[in-house]
Amino acid sequence: MPWIPRGLREGIVTTPYPRRPDGYGRGFRAAVAVRPGPHDRSRVGAAATACPTDAIADGADGPRLDRGRCVLCGRCVALAPEAFELDADFETAGVAREALVVPALPESDAAVAAARAALHRRVRALRRSVHVRHVDAGSDGAVEWEVAALTNPVYDVHRLGIFFTASPRHADLLLATGVGAAGMLGPLRETYEVMPEPKVVIAAGVDAVGGGLVGRGYAAAGGVGDTVPVDVWLPGAPPSPFGLLSAILLAVGLLPGGGHGTARGAGA
């Protein structure tokens, strides 16, 4: 059997995350970060104009970037490298939509802390075992490839008590992807309604968070947030399997440090 010598030769390939940092590649495009000032306002303005999803706002106190709308095209980094940079930190999920705006607004800290505490209390019973129902609500398929990777030997979510289920009646967590296509809003809502309590919803990928390049229109709702109550928002185009794993662990209260910028696992 050829897999026996191969296994002995390659050893353990499963990531140690979240027990300890994985040492993820420094050049990975997980998110765009805003550098501290001063900034060239003309270049920041050019970057904001070039952004295909209007994710950049140039205010009096400096630029802010909404990761929930950012498709990681890299135009802002190319046009204003002193203001924007690519960040390899994949722990980008937030328990509040405003938590995806960087740099964070001071007044949003209290709201994020309250949302995290409320979620922590609600999902206390889910920590031993979590069953996930994934619904594609109009995705281009990119996030689905990353979701499928979660069950391979590298990520092996089963080791953490995370399992995928075909029945929403057996699910604790709804993993929603896609822009909220008109034809999928009903099935998405019905899936959520038949799930038993307590239940958690993750909007995975920039399409599910804010509509991505499609946005809001007659054929799409601009994300899934108006259809189901989202507990965890995960940006990325697409988010990596590590990003998805961190979002699931954040949703059920198992991510060390509380998530979203508090526990860097990117090997930075």
Image (cartoon, rainbow, N blue to C red):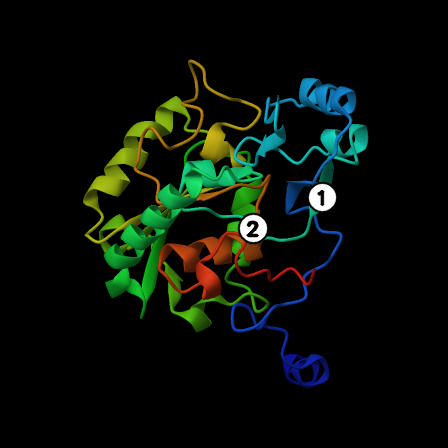
SS for dot 2 = helix
Q: Nearer the viewer, residue 151 or 43?
A: 43
Q: Looking at the picture, which amino acid does disc 1 mark?
A: Leu
Residue found at the very far top of the displayed protein: 218
The image quadrant that residue 24 belongs to is bottom right
**Residue named by callout 1:** 86
The spot of residue 82 in percent (x, y) is: 79, 36
Of badges 2 and 1, nearer the viewer stands 1
- Among numbered discs 2 and 1, the one appearing first in the sequence: 1
The image quadrant that residue 121 belongs to is bottom left
Quarter holding the N terminus is: bottom right
Specify whether 78 is left or right of 238: right
Specify whether 179 is left or right of 7: left
SS for dot 1 = strand
State yes or no: discs 2 and 1 in contact (Cβ < 8 Å): no
The residue located at (57%, 41%) in the rendering is 236
* Mark number, residue 146: 2
Instruction: Confirm whether residue 155 shows in the render.
Output: yes
Quarter holding the C terminus is: bottom right
